[in-house]
Amino acid sequence: MNEKLIIVGGGISGLTAGIYAQRSGFQTLILEKCATPGGISTCWKRGGYMFEGGVHWLNGSGEHLDLNKVWKEVGALKENNPVYFKDPVYVLKNGKAQLAIWRDADRTLQELSAYSPRDRKALRNIFRDVRMFKYFQSPVEGVTGIMDYIRMFPAICVTPRLWMQSIKHYLSRIKDPDVRTLMEAVVAPVNNAMTFAYTLSGFFTGDSGYPSGGSLRMALNMADTFREAGGEIRYNTAVEKVVDGGVIVNGELLKADAIIVTVDARTAIDKLFEKPLQDSWARRMRRLLVTSQTVFVGVGVEADLNAYPKSMVFKVPFKDGGVDIPFFVVSNYARDKYSPEGCTTLTALFPGYSYGYWKAAREDGTYDEKKKAVAEKFIGILEEQIPETKGKIAVMDVATPVTYQRYCDTYEGSYMSDWLPATLTTNAPNRYRKGLYFAGQRTAYSGGLPPAVISGRLAARLLCKDFKHKFI
Ligand SMILES: Cc1cc2nc3c(=O)[nH]c(=O)nc-3n(C[C@H](O)[C@H](O)[C@H](O)COP(=O)(O)OP(=O)(O)OC[C@H]3O[C@@H](n4cnc5c(N)ncnc54)[C@H](O)[C@@H]3O)c2cc1C
C-alpha cells in the first residue's frame, strides 16, 4: 500500500506538490475550499468578459530557465497556453509624448535618456545594476547546477546594496517624473531595489511572458496533470483542522500518513492547527510579515482597444477604496480575446494596505456601495484617458482584499509578501517534521508564482526523502 498524502489547498503550490508526490508513489488527495483549482491565481467571467485576476507576468516563461522546465513538468505551459512576450512592456503617455520600457534594454535606455537628458547618468547606473541580473534566476533544487550559480555571481555581488534600499529611494535619483513613474510601475516601490532589478532584467532577457490562456488555464492544466498521474482533488472542501494522523473535514477525521499545508502560512499558523503554532519562526512571522494587498478593478468595454498598448501606466492619482497612489497600471486584454467580438477587457490593480478599510466597510454595510464608488472613479479616469470607453462600459467588477480572504483565506486578503529593504525572511519552513510540510507563497522568497511552484516541488522532495521514495 502506498502512503496516503493529503494536501490542504489546490492553489499553484498545492497542485505542484500533488503532481510530484503522486508521481513519486504517494496516494495523494488535494482538498480545496473553492470550486476551481489555482487559488488566488485565477480568472473569472462577468457577462461574457473574462477578468485575469492572477498572473500578469510569469517568471520562468523563458525557455532558457530552469523554472521553465518545472512549469512544463507540471503541465502549466502547454500548447493550449502559449506564452507571449508583450513589447513594449509598459507605456506611459503624457499628452503627445510617449515613453516605454521595451524588451530591448539598449533601446529603452536610449529612449528614456533622450526623453530626459538630465537623467542620462542616473539611468546608465541603474541599467548597469539591472544588467548584473542577466543570468540570475530562481534556483530550483536538484535542477539548478553549480555553473548556473557561478553565472549568478554578478547579481549576488550587487544584491546587498540593492537589498538595503527601497525601490522608491533607489529611483529617487531620476529627476524626470514621467521616467521615474514608468520605472516605479515595474514593482511596488515599497519593495527593496533588488526585486526591481531582477524583475526588469527578466523583461530584458526573454523571461516574464504571459501564458495566453491565463491563470485559470494554467491551473486547470496542472489539475489535469495531477489527475492523469492518478491523484484526486475534492473541490468545495474546506479543511477545518490539521491534527495528528490526518485532517478534520465536516467534523470527521480523514486519515493520512503525511500532510502538506499550502494555505497561506500566516493564516495556517493561527487557524489550522489545534493550537496556534508558537515556534520561533511562527512568532517572527506574526511580528514582521508585511503583506501585499491590492484592489482589483475590471471593466468590459464595448469597443476594440487593440490599438492601445497592453500595459498602460496612468500617471493619475487614485485616492479611494483605502488606497492612495500617485499612478496605476491598466492592463488591456484586447489581444487576448477575453471579451465578445469587437470588445475589450481592461483591468487595474490598486496596491496599498486597504484590508482594514474594506473589512470596516463589510461590517458597517457599506461594502457594495464603496466597491461601486471605486469602479465609477476608475471608469471616470478611463473615459478621460481612453475616449473610446466613454458610455461603452458593459460590465464592471471589483475584488478587494476581503474578497481574496473570503475565497482563499489569505491573510488580510494579501496575495504575496512585500519584501522590504534590509529585512530577512519571515518564511515558514518547508519541513515541519516528518509527515508535516508547508508550501506556498510564504515559504520562499520573493513573491508570486515562482515561490509557489518551487516550494510545492520542494515539499514533495522532502516528503520523498522522509519516506524513502525516489523523487520523480
Ligand atoms: C491580482 C493578482 C495579481 C498577481 N500577479 C502575479 C504575477 O504577475 N506574477 C506572479 O508570479 N504572481 C502574481 N500573483 C501572485 C500569485 O498568484 C500568488 O503568489 C500564488 O498564486 C500563490 O499561490 P499559493 O499556492 O502559494 O497560494 P494560494 O493561491 O493562496 O493557494 C492556497 C489554496 O488553499 C485553499 N485553501 C485555503 N484555506 C483552505 C482550507 N481550510 N481548506 C482547503 N483549502 C483551503 C485556497 O482556496 C487556495 O486555493 C498575483 C496575485 C494576484 C491576486
Image (cartoon, grey):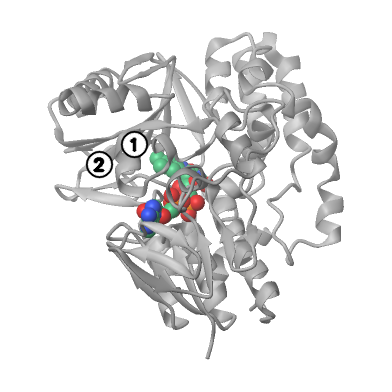
Label at residue 307: 1
Residue 124 lies, with reference to residue 429, above or below; the image says above
Q: Position of residue 3 (x, y in %)?
A: 54, 82
Label at residue 344: 2
Q: Where is residue 54 in the image (x, y as percent from the top left)?
A: 40, 46
Q: Which amino acid does label 1 sit on?
A: Ala
* Disc 1 packing (10 Å; few <14; some 14–19; many ≥20): few
Give whichever of 405, 346 is nearer the camera.
Answer: 405
At a point 68% along the width and 51% down the height, the residue shown is 138
Q: What residue type is labelled 2?
A: Thr
At a point 58% along the width and 61% down the height, the residue shown is 437
Judge whether residue 59 can be spotted in this image: yes
Give whichever of 239, 289 is nearer the camera.
Answer: 239
* Image quarter of the C terminus: bottom right
The extreme bottom residue here reads: 1
Query: Closer to the observer: label 2 or label 1?
Result: 2
